[in-house]
Image: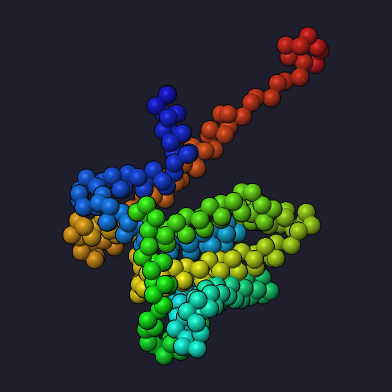
Amino acid sequence: MRAKRILYLLLREAGIGLALVLLALVFAAAAPRFASVANITNILTQISINTVIAVGMTFVILLGGIDLSVGSVLALATIVGGLVITSETLPPGVAILLSVAGSTLVGCLCGLFNGVVCERWKIHSFIVTLGMLNIARGAALQISDSRTIFSFPDSFNEVGAATIFGIPIIFLMALGVVLAGRFILNRTVFGRMIYAIGNNEEAVRLSGHAPSVYKVAAFTLCGGMVGLAAIMYMMRLKIASPILGVLRSGLVLRGMGDFARQMVTGLIIVVAVIIDKYRAQALMRSSFQLAPARPREGKGTGESP
């Protein structure tokens, strides 16, 4: 019974994090190079961009929506930022600041478009963001003329390669975004309203609030995070970045082929979701067990019912 309770506590507190730790231990045992400092640094760098995007996506998913356009919006924001930062008419410092502002603004505008269309015409976000996916992709190709933009200022490139005590700065930036997102969701009215709308939108509407405003804001925030991720993408000068950094790195070091990696990745995603399902059940059971029992009236007090 005690072991079962310990398992419940582990699932409740750790959740997907436990699966990540187990995954890392397996790869460290199977491929010794996986645990090397160089590989860990590479993993932290690879996951940073997708981590920032995931923070913005969290707000949309909590509302019961989805944003399929983040990849294409990332490409568009990167192209806009690249064109600004390589402008020969601007000093490097000004170009970097305008590039950051431009990429973030492009992401916010795309997110704003998604949110407004979804709420104004009550179209599911799956359809709207699928359309935005093609719009942003076409715009990125049209603006860039299908060419790669490079030759960024050295000071900009150095930030992407810099580390603090061996930890990449780009990862610390992503960690800061995660902490900020957690604070907004748990400590602000906006965050609590996001949770409330996701649980019962009609109840929020009847209480006098406007769910549409919060939904549009969530999509705009998601787009802004994509714009920020575009800047981080440019810092690393990567053409493409893996989604699952830890998993892909471990499988590559094991010498696994592309097709086999896709199969294993899909399997581990399913297993991770199953573990999270058990975590949710453990959380629900523990909340019932810890809730104090309500005393019955007239029992043990000498009073008549």
The count of marks equals 0
Q: Is 190 displayed left or right of 285 in the figure?
A: right
Residue at coordinates 48% horizontally, 64% vertically from top-left? 53
Tell me if residue 218 comes above or below residue 276 in the rendering.
Answer: below
Residue at coordinates 31% horizontally, 54% vertically from top-left? 40
Residue at coordinates 37% horizontally, 58% vertically from top-left? 163
Q: Position of residue 12 (x, y in %)?
A: 48, 39
Give 63 or 222, whichever is nearer the viewer.
Answer: 222
Q: Position of residue 108 (x, y in %)?
A: 58, 72
Q: Is 181 displayed left or right of 148 in the figure?
A: right
Tell me if residue 144 comes above or below residue 213 in the rendering.
Answer: below
Q: Position of residue 277 (x, y in %)?
A: 46, 45
Residue at the left extreme, as displayed: 255
Residue at the top extreme, as displayed: 302
Asked whether residue 139 is in view, the answer is no
Give 42 or 279, whichever is nearer the viewer.
Answer: 42
- Residue 171, picture quadrant: bottom left
What is the quadrant of the N terminus in the image? Answer: top left
Give 33 or 137, whichever is nearer the viewer.
Answer: 33
What is the quadrant of the C terminus in the image? Answer: top right
Q: Give the colour scheme of this rendering.
A: rainbow
Q: Position of residue 248 (x, y in %)?
A: 29, 59
Tell me if residue 4 comes above or below residue 159 in the rendering.
Answer: above
